[in-house]
Image (spheres, helix red, strand yellow):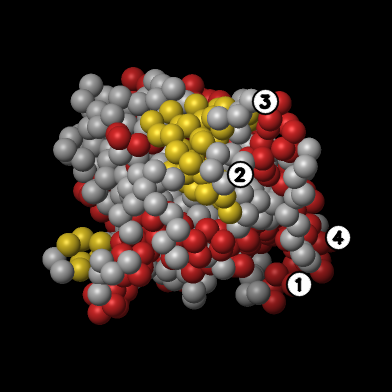
């Protein structure tokens, strides 16, 4: 066993002495050591239940003849960190999480790993660590939050963010806003729609790193407890057969994940996280070009918030990710190995009951193309990303004058002052991985615009958008402004033309005019210290997954 490095032989006497201080006995020294990476915190709704859920996991590990060792890592709630300096730390936390899990597993020589993440950066961070460690690993994602009820309507966190703009513009009373605030997020779990956290859980299951049904099993459900217990038992099968993340996370399984992502219309943040995880596996060809290629081939079959009216509870009731994959079976690599110790094909033979009103067939899709599109043009020569499944048909092609802001705060102030009007193209720059730094999510500007019912405004940024954003929101523009990208040349009043159908985004200037402007640009500089300063020096652009080099 790998753990023999800390528990076998006379040279490990001192190590055993410390292990005995933790309550281990002679019998325990003969058992596999199972690390449990738990992202429980008191301040993140997606994680507050993991303190109790992990007890079931530990119980099963002990009963199956293993020794569980729980350790914790950080988790940032993007909703709470949004629209202030805290959001600078959201994407960088992915790297801390990956490093924490890797450090703990290497330092203590665990034989296997059970990862218990929920939210946006925690799931990909732990997957990155699992790829680095390459020891038998299984994921138990924490599960979605139940939706709330407001005046008889089903609501979620994004309803609250958009209601703020509605209240500020006089379209909603402060009393109703307060009532909505109190009921939209009723308890534990990741926000109830297909935002980034739930998208990443769905892709973790598709990759084969969590058990079938895990992604949509809700945080407060008995189903989640049952899956957690089954996952703890399944880790012993992975140990016995020596099935490691490198056996599961292959080129083909990443392609499966992207297919499901496009079919669901998942968060654009996956175009950051999936390439970053694949980079840690090594030797794979997974990038935004692959998203673009597959988006022409994969239909959008499941319309979930924010792109549609269904929520994660509806998807779970309709059959969950196994049902989605069953409907997509002809587009998937079904010979991929999964954490069940079976192939995708073998897992899908157990899928029988599908609600086709929620999960459409590929012959009767919501739309014929996938939910994410990659746009290129003279202001995004290395690409940009849009969640086209959350864009109304009449805004898939748009041209308008620019209103330019060098930070999210400047833009939000302009929206609140009613400076943005229908037809505008709002440009938010110097918010990329280096420029922000940390590539902040622009949920507040998009929600404020939607709350004001400005449905014909496009937003473009070298930052990123929340999985909860909807409308023509184009993020990840690369190269970013801080790296001298053409987005830095845009001025107020310039015309930008967007054609999602043709995958193009264009500033209506000649290349010579753009280069002349760029030669005169004085970059915005941030006064940084600590971790953000280190991150800025190491971060790559969005089209590279924002990885550190």
Mark with earlier residue (2, 3): 2
For the residue pair 481 and 100, the one nearer the viewer reads as: 481
| Marks 4,1: beta carbons within 8 A | no
The residue indicated by pointer 2 is 491
| Marks 4,3: beta carbons within 8 A | no
Question: In the displayed image of the protein, which residue is found farthest to the left?
Answer: 152
Q: Which mark is on residue 11? A: 4
| Marks 2,3: beta carbons within 8 A | no
Mark with earlier residue (4, 3): 4
Q: Which mark is on residue 511? A: 3
Q: Secondary structure at mark 3?
A: helix
Q: Secondary structure at mark 2?
A: loop
Mark with earlier residue (1, 2): 1
How many angstroms separate mark 3 from mark 1 (CA)? 69 Å
Q: Nearer the viewer's eye, disc 4 or disc 2?
A: 2
Q: Nearer the viewer's eye, disc 3 or disc 1?
A: 3
The residue indicated by pointer 1 is 17
Q: Secondary structure at mark 4?
A: helix
How many angstroms separate mark 4 from mark 3 (CA)? 67 Å
Q: Picture coordinates of residue 336 (x, y %)?
A: 47, 27
Q: Residues within 10 Å of mark 3 (few under 14, many from 20)?
A: few
For the question of whether residue 284 can be seen, the reply is no
Q: Nearer the viewer's eye, disc 1 or disc 2?
A: 2
């Amino acid at each position: 066993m790998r753990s023999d490095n800390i528990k076998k032989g006379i040279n490990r006497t001192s190590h055993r002495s410390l292990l005995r201080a933790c309550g281990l006995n002679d019998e325990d020294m003969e058992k596999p050591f199972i690390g449990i990476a738990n992202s429980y915190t008191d301040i993140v709704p997606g994680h507050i239940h993991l303190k109790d859920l992990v007890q079931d996991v530990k119980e099963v590990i002990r009963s199956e003849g293993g020794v569980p060792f729980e350790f914790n890592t950080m988790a940032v709630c993007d909703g709470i960190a949004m629209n202030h300096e805290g959001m600078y730390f959201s994407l960088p936390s992915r790297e801390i999480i990956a490093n924490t899990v890797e450090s703990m597993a290497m330092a203590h020589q665990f034989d296997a790993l059970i990862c218990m993440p929920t939210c946006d950066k925690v799931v990909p961070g732990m997957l990155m660590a699992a790829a680095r460690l390459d020891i038998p690993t299984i994921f138990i994602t924490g599960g979605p939050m139940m939706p709330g009820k407001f005046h008889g309507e089903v609501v979620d966190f994004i309803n609250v963010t958009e209601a703020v703009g509605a209240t500020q513009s006089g379209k909603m009373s402060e009393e109703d806003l307060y009532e909505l605030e109190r009921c939209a997020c009723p308890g534990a779990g990741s926000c109830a729609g297909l935002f980034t956290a739930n998208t990443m859980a769905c892709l973790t299951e598709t990759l084969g790193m969590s058990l079938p049904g895990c992604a949509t099993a809700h945080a407060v459900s008995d189903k989640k407890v049952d899956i957690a217990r089954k996952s703890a038992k399944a880790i012993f099968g992975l140990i016995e057969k020596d099935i490691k993340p490198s056996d599961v996370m292959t080129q083909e399984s990443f392609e499966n994940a992207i297919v499901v992502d496009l079919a669901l219309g998942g968060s654009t943040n996956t175009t950051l996280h999936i390439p970053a995880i694949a980079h840690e596996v090594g030797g794979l060809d997974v990038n935004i070009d692959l998203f673009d290629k597959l988006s022409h081939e994969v239909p959008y079959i499941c319309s979930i918030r924010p792109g549609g009216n269904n929520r994660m509870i509806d998807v779970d009731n309709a059959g969950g990710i196994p049902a989605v994959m069953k409907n997509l079976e002809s587009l998937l690599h079904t010979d991929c190995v999964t954490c069940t110790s079976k192939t995708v094909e073998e897992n899908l033979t157990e899928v029988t009951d599908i609600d086709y009103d929620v999960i459409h067939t590929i012959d009767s899709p919501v739309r014929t193309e996938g939910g994410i599109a990659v746009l290129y043009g003279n202001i995004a020569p290395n690409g940009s990303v849009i969640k086209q499944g959350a864009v109304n048909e009449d805004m898939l092609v748009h041209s308008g004058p620019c209103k330019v802001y060098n930070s999210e705060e400047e833009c939000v102030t302009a929206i609140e002052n009613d400076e943005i009007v229908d037809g505008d193209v709002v440009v938010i720059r110097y918010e990329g991985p280096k420029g922000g730094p940390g590539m902040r999510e622009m949920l507040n500007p998009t929600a404020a615009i939607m709350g004001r019912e400005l449905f014909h405004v496009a937003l473009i940024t070298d930052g990123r958008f929340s999985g909860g954003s909807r409308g023509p929101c184009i993020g990840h523009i690369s190269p970013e402004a801080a790296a001298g990208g053409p987005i830095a040349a845009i001025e107020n009043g310039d015309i930008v033309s967007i054609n999602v159908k043709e995958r193009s985004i264009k500033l209506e200037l000649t290349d010579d005019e753009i280069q002349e402007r760029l030669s005169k640009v004085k970059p915005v500089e941030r006064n940084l210290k600590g971790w953000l300063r280190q991150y800025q020096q190491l971060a790559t652009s969005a089209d590279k997954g924002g990885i550190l080099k």
